[in-house]
Image (cartoon, coloured by chain):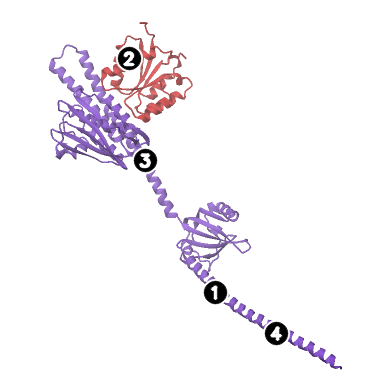
Amino acid sequence: MTKLSVEILERALKRERAARKQAERILEQKARELYTLTQELQFSNKELEHMVWEKTSELKGVFENIIDAFVVMDLSGKVLKMNDAAIDLLGYTIANEPINLIDIVHPDEKQGIIDAFKLLYVNGSVANYQVKVITKEGKTRLVDINASIIYDEKDKPVAAQGIVRDITEFKCLENQKEILLKKLEKSNDELQEYAHVVSHDLKSPLRSIYALVDWIKEDNEGQFNEETLHNFSLIDITLEKMEQLISDVLDYSSVTSENVSAAEVDLNIVFKDIYQILYLPDHIKLSCIKNLPSIKGNRSRLQQLFQNLISNAIRYCDKEEGLIDLDYKDQGEFYQFSIQDNGIGIAPEHHEKIFKIFQSLHQNKESTGVGLSIVKKIVESYQGEIWLESALGEGTTFYFTLKKEL
Amino acid sequence: MTRVKTMKVLLIEDDLIEVMKLKRSISKLDMDVTLVEAKNGEEALDLLKDSQSLPDLIFLDLNMPKINGIEFLKILKSDDVLRYLPTVILTTSSNRKDVLECYKVGVAGYILKPLKYDEYLDKIQKTLLYWSVNELIKI
C-alpha cells in the first residue's frame, strides 16, 4: 500500500467518524425530544382522563339526582338506563326485568307512541309529548315526555334519551279548574236569567193591579168622592214605586265585572248625555270643572254611575241656588273623580250605611235605596273606591276612583 | 180618515188580565179588529193548523208555560206557511238576550208592556194602526 493511499483511507475514515458522531448527536437530540414529547403526552393524557372521569361523574350525578324521571333507551324503545325517579314512577327495575317503552304505553295509545318514535328519529327530538303509561302496579299515569336522539361520533343515531314527567295530578287539577270555571259561568248566567224571570214575575201582577184600578175608575166615573180618588192615586204611586224597586234590583244584580267591556268611553259625551236625560230644575247649576278624560269600560255602566250620583245631588238640593260640580284628578293608574253639591248633607253616622242596598235615608217617591249600592258596585268593578265628605246643611262631596285600564 | 180594513189578531198570552187589557184596548179603537185568543203555544199551533183562517198579525208573550215564546217563534219560523205571519212580541222582559234572540229568529216588533194602563193603550193603538196600513199577506 502506498503512503498516498493510506492517507486517503485515513481521511475517509475520519470523515466517516465525524459523520457518525454527528448522526449520533442528532439521534440523541431526537430521542430526547421524543422523550419530552412522550412525557408531555402522558401528562395531558392523564389530564384528559381526569376530565373524562369528572364529566362522567358529573353526568352520573345529574342522571341520578334529576327530579324528573330520566330514561335512556335504544332505538327500538328498549330501556337501557333509568334513574331513581324513573324507577319510582314506573315501578320497574330494568336490572330484573327488561322493559320496552312501547309495551308500557296504554293500549289506546300504541299507535301514537310508534308515530312519536318515528318523529323522534326523523327530527332528532320530540317536545312535550303527552301519553298514558301503565305502571308495574297497573296504575295509569299521564306523562309528558321530552326526548332526543343520542348520536355517535359519526353522527349515526345510537340511542334515545328522555325526560318523563308525571302530569297526572296536574292534568287532573287543570281539568277540575276548567270544570269549576264552566260551572261558575253557568251559575252566573243562571242567576242573571233568574233575576230577569223573577223581575218579570213580580212586575206582571203590578201591571194587572194597575189596569184593574184604572178600569174601576173608568167604569165608575163621577161616582167616587175626593178621598177615594186620592186613595186610588196612592195605589198608583205605590205600584210605580214597587215597579221602580224591581227594576233597580234587577239593575243591581246585572252589575258584574263581566259587563266591563274594553271600549274607549269619552266621559265628556257621557256627561252631555246625562245633562240631557236628567230633569234639571232652573235653580240648580250643574257644571263640569274641566274637560273629562276617556276611560276603558262599559259606557252604559259608567253613565249609570255618574247619573245616579248627579241625580242624588239634584234630589237632595235645598238651597235657593243649587251647585253641582264635577271634577277629576289624574292619579297615574287611576282617575279620582269628585261630585260636589251644596245640598242637605249627610250625617257622619250614615256615611257607611248609604252604600248598602235598600238603605234610603229619606221617604221619597223616587228613592228606592238601591242607587248608591249600584254606584258602589260599579266603582268596585273598576277596582276603585268610593267615599264622601259631608257637613249637614252645607253639602256633600262624593269621591271615587276608577282604574284607567282594566 | 179612510176607514181601516178588518184585521184579525191572534193573541198568545196565559195571563187572564193581560187578555182583558188587550180586549179592552181594542174595543176603544175605531178599528175593525177581530181578536183570537190562545192561552199557550200548543193552543196557538192548534188554531194555526186551519190554513183557511190564519190571522193577519200575532201578538206573542215570551213568558209562557210549556213551550215558551222563543220556542214557539222558532216553530213558526220553520213552518213554510206560518213563517210569513208578522209576529210582534208583547212582553215585560227587556232582557237584552231575549231581544237579540227574537230579532235573530225574526220578529216584526218587540213591545215592552208598561206599568201604566194608558201607556199600554197608547202602544197597542199605535201598533195596530201601523199594521192596519201595512200590506198583509193573504195565503
Q: Which residue is mark 1?
A: A47
- The residue positioned 43% from the left and 52% from the top of the image is A171
Front position among marks 4 and 2: 4
Q: CA distance from mark 1 to mark 3?
A: 66 Å
Mark 2 belongs to which amino acid? Answer: Gln
Q: Which residue is mark 2?
A: B125
Q: Which residue is mark 4?
A: A24
Mark 4 belongs to which amino acid? Answer: Glu
Q: Classify mark 1: helix, strand or loop.
A: helix
Mark 3 belongs to which amino acid? Answer: Glu
Front position among marks 1 and 2: 1
Q: Classify mark 4: helix, strand or loop.
A: helix
Give the camera-side residue of B81 and B120.
B120
Q: CA distance from mark 1 to mark 4?
A: 34 Å
- Quarter of the image holding residue B106? top left
> Colour in which chain A is shown?
purple
Quick one: label 1, few (<14), some, or many (20+) residues within 10 Å?
Answer: few
Front position among marks 1 and 4: 4
Q: Which residue is mark 3?
A: A185
The verdict on a common chain for dots 4 and 2 is no
